Image: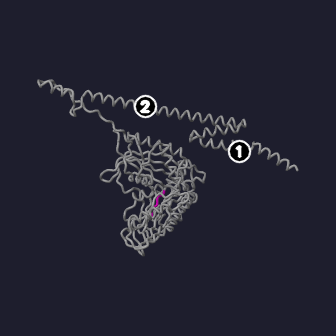
Amino acid sequence: MATTDFIVAIELGSSKITGIAGKKLPDGSLQILATANEKSADYIRKGVIYNLDKTTQSLTSIIKKLETALKASIGKVYVGIAGQSLRTIRNTEVRHLDEEIKISQELIDSLMDSNRTMPIVGYQILGVAPQEYKVGLDMTIDPVGVQTDHIEARFLNIIARSSIKQNINQCFEQATIGIADDSEDIIAPLALADAVLTPNEKRSGCVLVDMGADTTTVQIYKNNLLRHLAVIPLGGNNITKDICSQQIEEEDAESLKLRFAKAHIEPSEEDDENKVYQLDNRCSIKVQLFEDIVEARQNEILDNILNQVVLSGYENKLLAGAILTGGAANMPLMDVAFTKRTKIEKVRIAKETQYTLKGVEISKDGRNNTLIALLANGKENCCLAIPEVIAPKPVAPKPTVTKEPLRSVIEAQLFDEEGESMEAAKKREEEQRQKAKEAALAAEKAAKEAAEAEKRRKTECEELIKEAILLKEEKKYKDALKRLDKAKKMNIPEKEKDIITLEKEVKALKDENSIGTKFANILKGILDED
């Protein structure tokens, strides 16, 4: 039976794109209905899309897999923004008032609006985490209603390169997949924090570290407020690539890492320099060399995490310690290594979210925590709305002829319960069915004609490009440019790059072969001879 009430979320990871469909149950738990994934290492790096076409293909494939499992069409999805360049910057907005007034919500909103207009070249503000407000000499989180003539509003702006959001929107648009209106600016790390951290951890102060394949995301919380966020462009894949430097295939290097790597190695007096790790007779590596490689890269990642904690200014205020999650946090003894390197004594490995999961089983090793968080953020039904079909009015059964007066029998046969002529009702129903059939045929015909027209446009555009190439070779540059201009006006996106490149070549050749250029070259030759 088809499911018609569900939420769909998609995580754009550096190792794979994962889609999930589920629903929220009355008891607060999440029922998982279906999952699907596609490898993404070839077109998503550091959590950022760089090949739009391949990403679009994977999104289309994932949606089809989910629709097959759900036996229903998906109309929209929830997706989060993450990846390299995502970070926070502080800003302060000040208002000096002519006299003491009671702070209103309108004043706070105007400070927020002013903050959002802060210019950041190449970046855009995705979200704002208000910090404390300084009212007079006092600090407060909620200043509304306080009497003052001076207020300082401190904001933590979450920013990212403008291209990140643009690429996401473009891929979903090409895949004809809608993004839920209320998910347009979901910041994946913040959703993860809500799903993994306890209220006490956010209040007491903690650092949440999401250790992924290509990136490591660091978030600092204190007094229930986000205080710092940064994405480090290092992850578990860096360790794999370091192992590959020893002439080992990437697949084998990943297997060696998963089987033998430990985040912390205790020094031993019985180390055998000739001891090796063997992988099914495919490859081998000396134990000491392997451990040195893993330790060096792991320490680099941990040092970068500690640096972000120090930059936040909260290194001595994290009473709840550190919470580690993500696939790379599964490396054995990661908590020990983290404490040794950062001196943060309290460490928790979060392999699950705080939500109870039912239905389809998914791995509980931290890899899917962000995906679950995005699903939990969903509020709207993502099932594609099916146009409502007006059911024909029931026709009253023909009554048995009795000895009642002729007039009452005739009325019972000719009119329904609402007083409408049964003959008119049948005629109206038939007209509705005919109109629906005609509308469907018209829509199908229009779609077919549009597809054929688009195909003709593409063919015509290709022919114009071919003609321009021939004209270029015949040195008829003016005619070639006319063909390219006509092709450009046809607005075929996939041909736009070819047209621009060819146009530049023709213009360059035209300039080289112009009379003025030739004359200048001749004159230059004469002057050079003199």
Can residue 457 be seen?
Answer: yes
Residue 223 relative to residue 119: left or right: left
SS type, badge 2: helix
Depth order, front residue of 10/264: 10
Q: What residue is pinned by disc 2?
A: 442
Q: Position of residue 103 (x, y in %)?
A: 38, 69
- From this view, report whether residue 431 is shown above or below residue 254: above
SS type, badge 1: helix
Q: What residue is pinned by disc 1?
A: 508
- From this view, report whether residue 518 is shown above or below residue 367: above
Q: Quadrant of the N terminus?
A: top left
Can residue 262 be seen?
Answer: no
Q: Position of residue 450 (x, y in %)?
A: 49, 34
Depth order, front residue of 135/414: 414
The amino acid sitting under disc 1 is Ala
- From this view, report whether residue 455 is shown above or below residue 176: above
Q: Report the magenta residues as a range.
A: 207-211
Label 2, label 1: how many angstroms apart (C-alpha)?
A: 49 Å
